[in-house]
Amino acid sequence: MFFFSKNKTVLKDLIPEGHIDIHSHLLPGIDDGAKTFEDTLKLTQALQSFGVTQFITTPHIIQHIWENTHDGIVTNKIKTVQELEKNSINVPFKAAAEYLMDDQFVQLFQSNDLLTLKDNYVLVEMSYINAPIQLYSILFDLQVAGYIPVLAHPERYLFYHNNLNEYDKLKRAGCVFQLNLLSVVGYYGPKIAQIAEQLLAKGMYTYVGSDVHHDNHIAAFEQKIKLKDLVPLQEAISNNQFFNLG
């Protein structure tokens, strides 16, 4: 009874030419993403083949795990761009960071400039185990300091799945939501795909990101999207033009 099935769109085919990826882990040897420049080159070329023409890469800053610094990230980025140019890749390539919201993060934004996606937009994440005890205090203080929090992959925080009202609370607290594209093909599991679909249907996502770390993530772009309605996803994808690096 195959005539009951509907053709699904492959994820890579939904990425428009000229897309700006605002969340990836392409800098080599700096976190759990690319290990070597050869990895960086391969991942960058793969994303280019999908239509990405500008990159804002976002290495982790996590206390006691990925102790990256502002200067260290910038230095790595400069060297990486030089190597990419040697390999005929001359595209806008910026480094921001993906900050874990913890006590160290509060100290960072209160005493130093953060590496932002653009202007005052800063990419933040939570532990996958639980939300920070002082989450809403952190979000408030971050905005008082002049930043706009872009919350990475809210669909992946399992502790919110049984109470979707928490997502409304996060939006009211000033969070801008960024969807991981691989969530919509079920890469992280069917429940996360389901939550992503529900949040998309409610218009809660503003931007998207690849969150590419390695070859398995690239391969997942060949999978079919599990959504019934692609329009909210297409709108979020198009919104990434806001981050045009010029």
Image (spheres, rainbow, N blue to C red):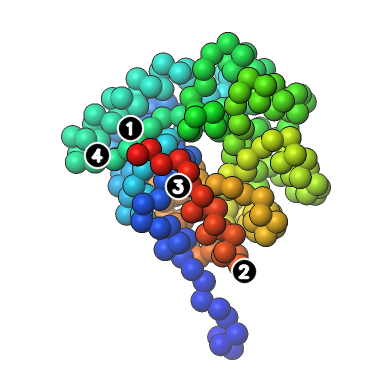
Residue holding disc 1: 36
Residue 241 numbered tag: 3
Image quadrant for the N terminus? bottom right
**How far apart are the alpha carbons under marks 2 and 3?**
24 Å
> Which amino acid, by three-letter code, is at mark 1?
Thr
**How far apart are the alpha carbons under marks 2 and 1?**
38 Å
Residue holding disc 2: 228
Front tag of 4 and 2: 4
> Which amino acid, by three-letter code, is at mark 2?
Lys
Front tag of 4 and 3: 3
Residue holding disc 4: 90
Q: Are marks 2 and 1 in contact (CB under 8 Å)?
A: no
**How far apart are the alpha carbons under marks 4 and 2?**
37 Å
Estimate the x, y position of residue 27 in percent, counting from the top left. Answer: 38, 31
Q: Nearer the viewer, residue 94 or 196?
A: 94
Mark 1 lies on a secondary structure that is: loop
Residue 2 numbered tag: none
The reply to whether residue 40 is visible in this rendering is: no
Estimate the x, y position of residue 51 in percent, counting from the top left. Answer: 36, 54
Q: Is residue 176 above or below residue 79?
A: below
Task: Using the rendered view, name the quadrant where residue 141 is placed.
Answer: top right
Mark 3 lies on a secondary structure that is: helix
Q: Is residue 219 above or below residue 74?
A: below
Front tag of 1 and 3: 3
> Which amino acid, by three-letter code, is at mark 4?
Asn
Q: Earlier in the sequence, mark 4 or mark 3?
A: 4
